[in-house]
Amino acid sequence: MIIKIPREVETALNILHTNSFEAFIVGGCVRDSIMGKVPSDWDVATSAKPEEILLCFNKHKTIETGIKHGTVTVIIDKMQIEITSYRIDGEYTDNRRPDDVFFTDKIEFDLKRRDFTINALAYNKNGIIDLFGGFDDIQNKIVKCVGCPDERFNEDGLRILRALRFASVLNFNIEEKTSDSIYKNKALLNNISIERINIEFNKLIMGSNYQSILLKYREIIEVFLPEIKGLSSEELKYRLYSMKALDSLTLRLAVLFHKIGSTDEILMNLKYDNKTVKTVKLLTENINEKIYSDPVTIKKWLNRINYENLSNLIKIKKALFDYEYEELTSSETIMEEIIATNQCYSLKTLSVNGQDLIDAGIPKGKNIGMVLNKVLNEVIEGKLENKKDILLNYIYDKGMGLWKQ
Ligand code: ATP
Ligand code: MG
């Protein structure tokens, strides 16, 4: 088995070897390479201690953010490579990183602390180190704990969710003992910080096998998301199936979380960022509204919730409601046409603005906005052309806006 390692990573391994240290690529990059996938990043494990890593790379730019836990980021030809000293983890009481780490010069110990056999492989030019059968588990598509599942989940409960995440993303099955232990120990997720849960949960629902994993392990998800208990299995199945057509996390969340209580509260509790919370709230609030396929209605929608939100709303409604599919498709075409031809649907695109009205003698104040919105409505309804002189004449003729004498 030969893994093609990027030149920059090869350089890092060579520098460590030249300084008489051991060094391997480890974890996700070995797993992905064996699967024929391009790894998102390349992690290196070494027998060098953090200060020794710094010395080896004193001619390179290094970042010391993780140094307490043994990690130094080295930049080689613009590529960031995380180099971590072989370590044994202490307890994870803060639920993010182990309280203490102990450095070791044996790769065996470093691999033993890793969560799953598929993530516990190391590789360098001398070959692969596979102490726990990870290579075969990758071939057989199995997620299996390194060592005793009950013990490993008790050390760090997040591993329960990570198992589901890897099974979803890689399309793997969870080995029986590991799976039994996941059910048995699910309450351990209560001890885990929501920030860590959030990261794994997002990866899980974006993974290729999320449907069967979330159905099979729904009671695990209910530990941190009790709101989904209200969904019948038919309804949950249907929502998960509908999510497939959507390729963004925000849209998948909107489908999963609509009408199961206060969507924004659920999302805030799960520590989603403000933009996601706001967007999902708006989408779920409007999910049952009809979007009739006529230009006036579509312009009013665009004015109310903007283009990005309306296209997303149409997407999730199309995914959920088959019987509205055709009408939504024509609404979508009309919307795209309005945007492509720069038609007016908002105050921003109206040919008069507040200053124009002030210049024309309308006193500053609330009525400016009222006049503009009235005129916008006439333009949207096709009763007025969106031209400045036409709009100003109309305003003048109607005596709108209390002209100054
Ligand atoms: P991805 O491609 O999604 O980043 P990954 O396997 O690299 O997958 P990371 O979360 O980046 O996953 O972790 C890197 C490696 O660190 C893992 O492959 C695993 O060996 C180890 N690891 C990460 N988190 C844990 C944990 N909670 N317990 C034990 N080992 C872990
Ligand atoms: Mg990674």
Image (cartoon, rainbow, N blue to C red):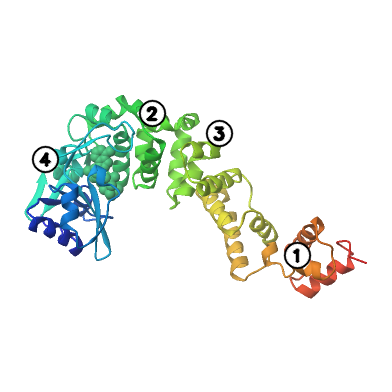
Q: Residues within 10 Å of mark 4 (few under 14, many from 20)?
A: some
> Which residue has dot 4 on it?
108
C-alpha span from label 2 to label 3: 21 Å
**Dot 2: what SS?**
helix
Q: Nearer the viewer, mark 2 or mark 3?
A: 2
Q: Earlier in the sequence, mark 4 or mark 2?
A: 4
**Dot 4: what SS?**
helix
In the rendered view, does 194 fall on the left or right side of 276?
left
> Which residue has dot 1 on it?
354
Q: Residues within 10 Å of mark 2 (few under 14, many from 20)?
A: few
Asked whether residue 342 appears in the rendered view, the answer is yes
Q: Which mark is residue 190?
A: 2
Q: Which mark is residue 261?
A: 3
User: Callout 3, which amino acid?
Assistant: Gly
C-alpha span from label 2 to label 1: 54 Å
Furthest residue to the bottom? 389
Vertical arrangement, residue 342 with respect to residue 283, above or below: below
